[in-house]
Image (spheres, rainbow, N blue to C red):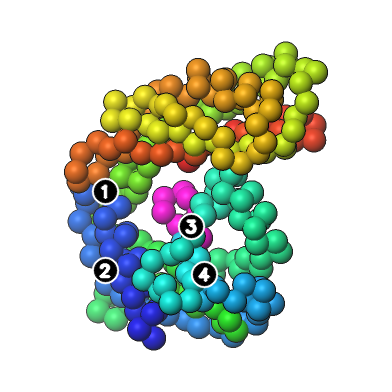
């Protein structure tokens, strides 16, 4: 129970920090719903160091945090499942993981509020997967102002200023010109550092073999993903690591993802 309360408190603090400061939000209610679900027991038998897994959203990003035994206050691993690179790494390490579906939760009545239409409301759902159970953590907020608060991703990570679709199309054209270079890995993942001025540098490969193909991709990305909004928080602008992945599909189309 203490672990669950700690996780719930961390999530509330995280959300409070990320909400747009132009709107005032207030936590009104929260509850946990536990459901018996043994579908992940084989997974926990296979990875006995894992205590529990927490899934939640930050903006449009779906986050999965893994907590090991004895490390309940901070995740030992974090994956952003909406980033193709992290999804690849997660599936590579944890094959056939039984991802639960998000619960469709709606608050239809709250004591003390006569009409839901009289207040601005928003919800947040966090799911914890443990042996034998799923636990859904539901939070209900009210906010002031005419517009719903939005998660400001500049507080979360640097943001690429360019058009990823145009970037992908240009890479597909380059890829055709590189033949007969052999694609050694269907997906490669690279990291770089976006400095305080929004410039990127120190690109390096972290997943995939070093080859003529991966070197071509690194050179291409170094010349194309040059303009960013840097990470910004209460301490000002910060240099921050970003991750990028390039996947070549069977039909030779390409998927570029940036986090």
Q: Nearer the viewer, mark 3 or mark 2?
A: 3
Which badge, 1 or 2, comes first in the chain's sequence?
Answer: 1
User: Where residue 97 sits in the image (x, y, percent)?
Assistant: 66, 65
Examine the structure image and report whether residue 59 is included in the region drawn in magenta: yes
For marks 4 and 2, give the one nearer the viewer.
4
Q: Residue at x 48, y 24 (%)?
A: 225
Do the numbered discs 4 and 2 sit on residues whose CB atoms are within 8 Å? no
Marks 3/1: CA–CA distance: 24 Å
Distance between mark 4 and mark 2 Cα atoms: 24 Å
Quarter residue 43 falls in = bottom right
User: Which is nearer the eye, 103 or 200?
Assistant: 200
Residue tagged by mark 1?
20
Q: Is residue 175 left or right of residue 154?
A: right
Return the residue found at the far front.
Answer: 210
Residue that mark 3 sits on? 78
The x, y position of residue 240, in whole percent, is 36, 39
Above/below status of 174 relative to 47:
above
Residue designated by label 4: 53
Q: Residue at x 65, y 62 (%)?
A: 94
């Amino acid at each position: 129970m203490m672990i669950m309360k700690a996780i719930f408190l961390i999530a509330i603090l995280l959300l409070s920090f990320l909400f747009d400061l132009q709107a005032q939000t207030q936590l009104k209610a929260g509850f946990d719903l536990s459901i018996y679900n043994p579908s992940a027991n084989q997974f926990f038998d296979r990875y006995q160091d894992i205590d529990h897994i927490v899934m939640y959203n930050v903006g449009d990003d779906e986050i999965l945090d893994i907590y090991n035994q004895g490390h309940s206050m901070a995740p030992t691993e974090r994956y952003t499942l909406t980033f193709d690179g992290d999804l690849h790494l997660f599936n590579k390490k944890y094959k056939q993981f039984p991802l639960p579906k998000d619960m469709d939760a709606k608050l239809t009545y709250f004591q003390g509020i006569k009409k839901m239409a009289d207040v601005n409301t928003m919800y947040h759902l966090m799911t914890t997967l443990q042996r034998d159970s799923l636990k859904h953590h539901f939070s209900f907020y009210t906010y002031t102002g005419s517009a719903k608060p939005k998660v400001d991703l500049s507080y979360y990570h640097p943001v690429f200023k360019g058009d990823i679709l145009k970037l992908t199309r240009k890479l597909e054209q380059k890829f055709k010109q590189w033949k007969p270079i052999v694609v050694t890995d269907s997906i490669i993942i690279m990291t770089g550092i976006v400095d305080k001025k929004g410039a990127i540098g120190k690109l390096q490969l972290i997943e995939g073999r070093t080859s003529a193909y991966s070197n071509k991709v690194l050179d291409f990305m170094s010349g194309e993903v040059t303009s960013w909004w840097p990470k910004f928080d209460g301490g000002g602008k910060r240099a921050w690591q970003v991750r990028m992945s390039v996947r070549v599909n069977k039909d030779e189309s390409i998927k570029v993802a940036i986090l």
